[in-house]
Image (spheres, rainbow, N blue to C red):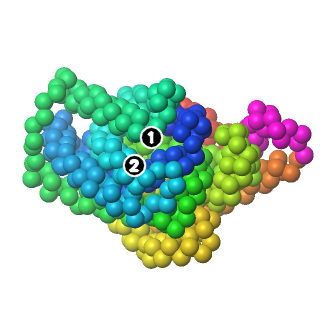
Amino acid sequence: MIKNIIANFIGRFWSLLSAFLFIPLYIRYLGFESYSVISFTLVIAGIMAVLDAGLTATLSREFARKDNSSEDKLNVFKTLESSYFIIIGISIFIVFSLSGAIANHWLNVKSYQPEQISLFLKIISFDIGFQLLLRFYIGGLLGLEKQVEANFYQVGWGMFRNGFVVVALLFYPSLNVFFCWQTISTIIFTFLIKLALEYKLVGKYSFNFVFRVDQKILKRIWKFAGGMLLISLIAAINTQLDKLAISKFLSLDSLGYYTLAIAVAQVLIVLANPISTALLPRFTSLYSEKRIVDASILFQRITVFVSILVFALMANMSFFSKELIFIWTGDISIAKRVATFLPIISFSMSMLSLALLPYTIAIANGYTKLNNVLGIVSLFVTLPGYWFATRIFGAIGAASVFCGVQVMTTIIYLYFINRKFLHLSIFRFIFFKSLLFPLFISLLVTYVFSIIPVFFENSRIEMLLWIGLSTFITLLASLLILVPVKTIRSLLNSRSF
């Protein structure tokens, strides 16, 4: 388990590092509005992810089940893979067909003609389709607890897709080159990961594809997959609607500033997600073996650490928002614009991060009803909320609606998942020890650091060291106050997992 968590951290850390390294280079070589176009294509990719239809989560869960034989797993894989080829065809067709309408009637872009935007969208339609298939195969490796291999391929894909493209941009700085490079990289790595997954299943590499749909398998998994489909649909709306509203009612530059803030705040998801990803197979195994008490103990041990980590980083993002963006981009004007959104968005992402572990508990039990109920109810807030808040208050209005929805849904979600599966003390452990105490300590310690006079505002390195020291002291103070020493020693012992 420790090895898998470390592997997931490395994979997620690479995605964070690549954003830190490459986004400023994209802005430098292509211009900020071109980066804003890239940001919009990521919104489209997020919306199209709903076509996954819950099949990736279903594959991971079926592979993690201890009551499935190797033959059962192979049959599930072939059935879901066959379905997935239909899905990527639909994905490519939708984006390709709507590219002209989006370019002509949705975006407010100054530097590019609608015909150019339409061409960009046509190119990335293939990238989006194969990204779906790539993540499907990655989900299979994760379900088999081959998380070292999964992260190896993800890091390699990210390096070729997001890193080496900078070399091409040095000689040919255009969005055509950027999107073509990314699409080709995704297609190549999709087939490499498919080969790796099939080798784990059958012990040999094979390029053969046989269309196979087992009706018995579909009947067995349709309820869980259908629940995951609805979760994906609602999540796509709730996580992309703010960006869609900004791209519709404001300039595309506003979307660029907003997505830069999200790129920084997503470090919170990057840190929490590897833990929940590594724990999903273990929780699935524990619940399939009816070891409910062991699952609750494991959840209790991990949750406090995740809360301490997430809130410590969130507090430093909030109090040092302008400084962090300036360190990252080297542009004070961009830093001032992005710093407006970062405190609100970072708190939103911290609440979303804390929902990942209870979500893992729900998925391990095949329970999707609560996600769907909360998601549908939240649409009554987000659908009108984003539209009106963005038109009246601008991007800060969209960020505020996003924050309010995340806070409320996370609190409600924690309460009901605990009551159904964990049976821990809802106030003493869930709300106080896991939420309020870590939040209060982090904000207090970071606030003290933020009001201490410093004399190196123009030195990015010294500023980064100061923020790093603040983060370290915040983490240390929270650990010493909230976690007994014997618990830390227990968690460091891999046998405790």
Q: Is 158 left or right of 82, judged from the image as shown?
A: right
**In the rendering, at what x and y percent does residue 252 appear?**
53, 57
Which span of residues is magenta-colored?
Answer: 453-477
Q: Quadrant of residue 236?
A: bottom left
Please determine whether, in this image, residue 75 is positioned above or below residue 345. above
**In the rendering, at what x and y percent does residue 237 appear?**
41, 64
**Residue occupied by mark 2:** 116
Q: Are marks 2 and 1 in contact (CB under 8 Å)?
A: yes
**Within the magenta stretch, is there residue 468?**
yes
* The N terminus: image quadrant: top left
Labels 2, 1: front one: 2
What's the residue type where badge 2 is placed?
A: Gln
Q: Residues within 10 Å of mark 1 (few under 14, many from 20)?
A: some
**Within the magenta stretch, is there residue 57?**
no
Instruction: Say which mark, if any, is on residue 175.
Output: 1
Q: CA distance from mark 2 to mark 1?
A: 9 Å
Q: Secondary structure at mark 2?
A: helix
